[in-house]
């Protein structure tokens, strides 16, 4: 068998394996999980509220050290 024929045979086998995987139940369940996750991310995202676990920034009102107070 020539080199080209061997490469073509391997390529064809890989193509058939990929096609079998894309038609498998495992792939459909995996894809369904991503679809459910994407819908949940858009449906359950908060409106315009800041995240609950972060604190708000507090501005400093003191004059910098070394500057003259008026």
Image: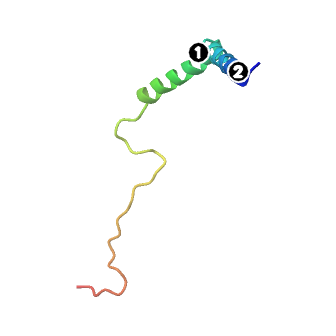
Q: Position of residue 57 (x, y in %)?
A: 39, 59
Q: Nearer the viewer, residue 69 or 48?
A: 48
**Residue at x-position 37% and y-position 83%:** 65
Q: Which mark is residue 51?
A: none
Name the residue at 31% across, 86% down: 67
Question: Going 35% across and 69% down the picture, which residue do you hit?
Answer: 60
In the shown orientation, is residue 53 left or right of residue 62? right
Q: In terms of depth relative to the viewer, which is nearer, 59 or 31?
A: 31
Q: Provide the secondary structure element on which disc 1 rests.
A: helix
Rendered residue at 60%/21% (across/down) = 30
Q: Quadrant of the N terminus?
A: top right
Count residues near mark 1 (Cα–Cα under 10 Å), then give few for <14, some for 14-19, many for 20+: few
| For discs 2 and 1, the disc positioned in front in the rendered view | 2
User: Which scheme is used to colour this image of the protein?
Assistant: rainbow
Circle 1 residue: 28
Write down the residue under mark 2: 10
* Vertical comparison of 45 with 15: above or below: below
Is residue 52 positioned above or below 58 on the image?
above
Q: Where is residue 29 in the image (x, y as percent from the top left)?
A: 60, 17
- What element does badge 2 sit on? helix
Q: Residue extending furthest right? A: 1
Question: Quadrant of the rendered structure where residue 48 is?
Answer: top left
What is the distance, in whole Å, between disc 2 and disc 1 at their CAs? 26 Å
């Amino acid at each position: 068998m020539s080199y080209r024929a061997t490469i073509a045979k391997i390529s064809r086998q890989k193509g058939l394996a990929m096609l079998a995987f894309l038609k498998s139940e495992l792939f459909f369940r995996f894809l369904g999980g991503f679809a459910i996750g994407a819908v949940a991310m858009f449906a359950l995202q908060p409106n315009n509220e800041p995240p609950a676990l972060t604190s708000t920034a507090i501005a400093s009102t003191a004059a910098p050290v070394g500057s003259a107070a008026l």
